Amino acid sequence: MADRIIIDADGMPYRELNVRIREAVAAGTQVIDLHGVRGQRFIGNAVEGDVSINILGVPGQDLGAFMRGPHIRVQGNAQDGVGNTMDGGHIVIDGMAGDVLGYAMRDGSILVRGDVGYRVGIHMKSYLDRVPVIVVGGKAGDFLGEYMAGGVIVLLGMDTGKPEAPVAGRSLGTGMHGGVIYIRGEVPEHLLGPGLALSPLDEEDGAALARHVQAYADAFGKDAAEILGASFVKVHPRSHRPYGNMYVGTN
Amino acid sequence: MRSKPISQHFNDFVVERERARCIDCEVCVRQCSYGVHFWDEARKRVEHDSSKCVGCHRCAAMCPTDCLTIRRKPSDFRENALWTPAFIKNIYKQSDTGGVLLSGMGCPSPKPVYWDNMLLDASQVTNPSIDPLREPMELRTFLGGRPDRLVFEETPQGPKLQTEIGPQLQLEYPIMFAAMSFGAINYNLHEAMAKAATELGTFYNTGEGGLHPDLYPYGANTIVQVASGRFGVHKDYLNAGSAVEIKVGQGAKPGIGGHLPGEKIDEEVSRTRMVPKGSDAISPAPHHDIYSIEDLLQLICAIKEATQYRVPVSVKIAAVHNAPAIASGIVRAGADIVVIDGFRGGTGAAPTMIRDNVGIPIELALAAVDDRLRDEGIRNRASIVAAGGVRCSADVVKAIALGADAVYIGTAALIAVGCTLCGRCYTGKCPWGIATNESRLKKRQNPDEAARRLTNLVRAWGHEIQEMLGGMGLNSIESLRGNRDKLRGIGLGDTELDILGIKHAGR
Amino acid sequence: MKAPKDFWKFDKDIAGCGVFGVIDRKRNLIPGTMPIDAMCTMHDRGNGLGGGFAAYGIYPDRADDYAFHIMGDDAAALERAETYLAGLFDVHHAEPIPTRDVLTVKNPPLVRRYFLAPKAVRPQWQHMGESDYVVGAVMHVNTRIPGAFVFSSGKNMGTFKGVGYPEDIADFFRLDEYRAYMWTAHNRFPTNTPGWWGGAHPFTLLDWAIVHNGEISSYGINRRYLCEHDYECTLMTDTEVVAYLLDLMVRKHGLSKRMASWVFAPPFWDEVDRMPEEQRKAFTALRAVYGAALLNGPFAILVTDSRGMMGLNDRVKLRPLVVAEKDTMTFMSSEESSIREVCRDLDRVWAPKAGEPVIVELEA
């Protein structure tokens, strides 16, 4: 039983790599370093427990899917499907991430230093103290927080490779019926999905935001005060049942 | 009680009154315009003569105690697959009167309805379906002729169009209100359609009765029609709308002209159409300046000159056997829009024999016309609008998949404001206040309330169309138009599948 | 042209996939091992039923000839095709495409390549431009000569594809022996027509080669529209329409690739409504005229021709696409890891916006 092991993943097929990771977790390893990762899928998939996995390279699709508990840190960019239906744990990506990040997330957190792709935070859910959180240091594509039912998304728009682009894309928060999105700076109203409103933050919001920004700052060595020193706006739904009146019964 | 020949006892409906609930309030007496209900002085109560009932349900709808039911009178005749009661009764009527049978509304007989034999696709796994409530879904449609290619100058601000492109109608829904003449229906409905079309971002058609001056302000959402009777046609009229439609034919009565019975010509209609009150207003069968295709070209050009080429010109034909060839000729004659009206199309008055036996289904005609125009490489030169029996949003989707750019709804629009398809429009006694010009009846239609109902209908259909499009993995209606692959036939033979250009379900 | 009989009775395959492309703007030659290794990383995006590569700059000694790659069910089919082509073209050289036996590539068709130039005195189609003449010949072989298919018809470029994982197809065609300044590659997951070599990507016509990840839900109308413009879709795969639509819009109608990308992935109407007057007119006209060429459904496509490479996503970005640069090379791929596999260190990595093409031109 080792506290820390290194696995050289260079050229290793993902099934073999994931077996090795599970064996290490089962043996009680506390820190697993993966070197030479290039495209291996499903790393951390359904892994449960308080283990740390450090990834050097670019992990493949569905990193940390169904995961419950581990801490994953990626030194590099991630691809699509990060934290898919994640049930707890923490993923930190020191780079940018792809599309469909945090889909149906139920708990835990995902912190991304830079930009993320499209359809991030779709159908996040929360219940009592299980509140998933996504913090993005850069900008996001269309459909951020689509169908959101709970949880928190923080979008900073600061560490970005797209200086000309607006902080988020179109259909922002579309179908949102719970949860909240905090965005730093200006949000053009025409980007909002139907039935949503932009409001300033209240005290409770401010406290929550400060916590999440601090986590982001700690993860990437940034200055939390500098981040918080700009105005933020919150996106939230105007109704819990926006389409309640749309239907008429027939046989 | 009354002496009538035996041949007139076979009425279609009976009124059933629950005596215990009837409070003799006489609402039914006032509401019925056919004289069914009356105060019986001898019995001191409301009585009714079922032989006059046309099955319009107005009395039942208005009765405050809900004591009236209108039932089909069970057939007294022996079952006979050939001599159905309708044929028998028609002979009685004709031998009584020597008259030509006249009907209102579209052909009711049980000929195939192809909409009901086509099914739509949905995407799964290999292609995501799209949620139109939350993701973009585009129904915007343009009607008009277009070139095959365009030239652009690309500048730092973006592309600039160099090619001249002819005038287009912009529709926010691929649904317009069909031509129903002022006279066949009254001013209140026209005002309602004008308001609804404006609210929705689509168009309504004046029909062949001209345009009332009070409706000129809605010109941006009006298509003015020029029919063979040229009622109300003058240069201001031509320039009042956003498009001009030449009515060559109508699905309910291909080959014959329009007919507005004298009963329906009141002061306003007389003024707008410029015909004497009380006399029948006839539109001749052909336009008497169109006896050959080159004459149509001449009329289209004449109208374009009169409107200084500012508006698209549309030509409406009935769906008949040679529809594809006729449509091709119409497009080559310069029409920007071709409207095809199928044999189920509605009417205020048409000879029954013509209505029920002349013309072909819109589904087949539409598929054939779309194919012909594409085969000849001229599909871009004119938009196709389909009409004649579009009953619901699924019919609209199927029509577009067969090749239509948009549809006209007539009967559906009237049902939206209360019509019960009793088919007695030619009497001018419509108790719903629709197909009548009698002042006490027409005020039963409030234009704002009717406009609200029409707007509701099209909006609801719009949502449903978006759902069906999204289900097919499409987010833009251009990708449905003419995309026959989204349809499958069910219970259709090889020839029908070939004409429609669709495979059978399961293939 | 008039739709042929039973035009509506077609089968179309559905496929999921992975794509990769690399271009060296200064035309430095890249060995085939690079796209092959990149595709290996994306092995799981396919199911072994289709793989293919396009390579540009591989026939420098015969750069003026049209290099036809033809697959035939048997020698007789190839002979029929050859006889036909010899009637229209001077055949400067013909040879089998060099291949190796690969266990996992079963029952390959015969594959031959021909270096052709249109005859100076043409037996038919005298009025046509040279490109249309070549396209006519390709369409004829593909629709009227049973058992033979032209799967590449450009100059100084070639497509190599078939039924198998891309690395196995590359092995079969000995692509490790080739060097090209531009490559695209594709890994296919078909569901309908396994065993059909013609259905693999890339799809080509003249210099165009397309690899495509996604499904075109507007295929039915794209195909009909192309028929109106004399292109017959025979290869039972929706990607075919992309190649022909580009040939129509860019080569025949003179639209730029940028404008063509706006036909495939137009801005939404609410964005158009917010544009200045001139642009609003332009985009409205573009959709009104070319609506039947809109590509609906998820897609990431890589388009190459003799001028360069274009990558484009559908307008709601339902498929992944990552672009990266290193010195004179630009990479485009479904997954970043495949780029990193062949180039560890990158100058810049980004994901393009939905509906916005990334166009990289070869320097003259």
Image (spheres, coloured by chain):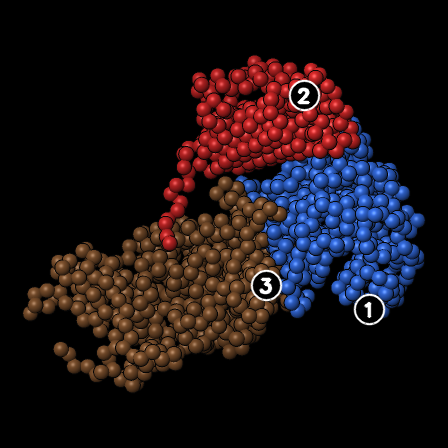
Density class for disc 2 (Cα within 10 Å; few <14, some 14-19, many ≥20) is few
Is C18 on the left or on the right of A110, as rendered?
right
Is C361 on the left or on the right of B104, as rendered?
right
Q: Residue at x 78, y 65 (%)?
A: C146
Chain for disc number 3 = B
Indicate the chain coloured blue by its letter: C
Indicate the chain coloured red by its letter: A
Q: Residue at x 38, y 59 (%)?
A: B413
Position of the N terminus of chain C by quadrant: bottom right
On whether disc 2 and disc 1 are found on a single subunit, the reply is no
Distance in Å between CA atoms under marks 3 and 2: 59 Å
Q: Residue at x 53, y 48 (%)?
A: B470
Indicate the chain coloured brown by its letter: B
Distance in Å between CA atoms under marks 2 and 1: 77 Å
In the structure shown, which secondary structural element does the residue marked by tag 1 occupy? loop
In depth, the one of B302 and A92 nearer the eye is: A92
Q: Which residue is mark 3?
A: B503
In the structure shown, which secondary structural element does the residue marked by tag 2 occupy? loop
Q: Which residue is mark 1?
A: C124
Q: In the figure, residue C240 lies in which quadrant?
A: bottom right
Position of the C terminus of chain C by quadrant: top right
Residue type at mark 1 is Gln
Residue B442 lies, in percent from the top left, at 26, 61
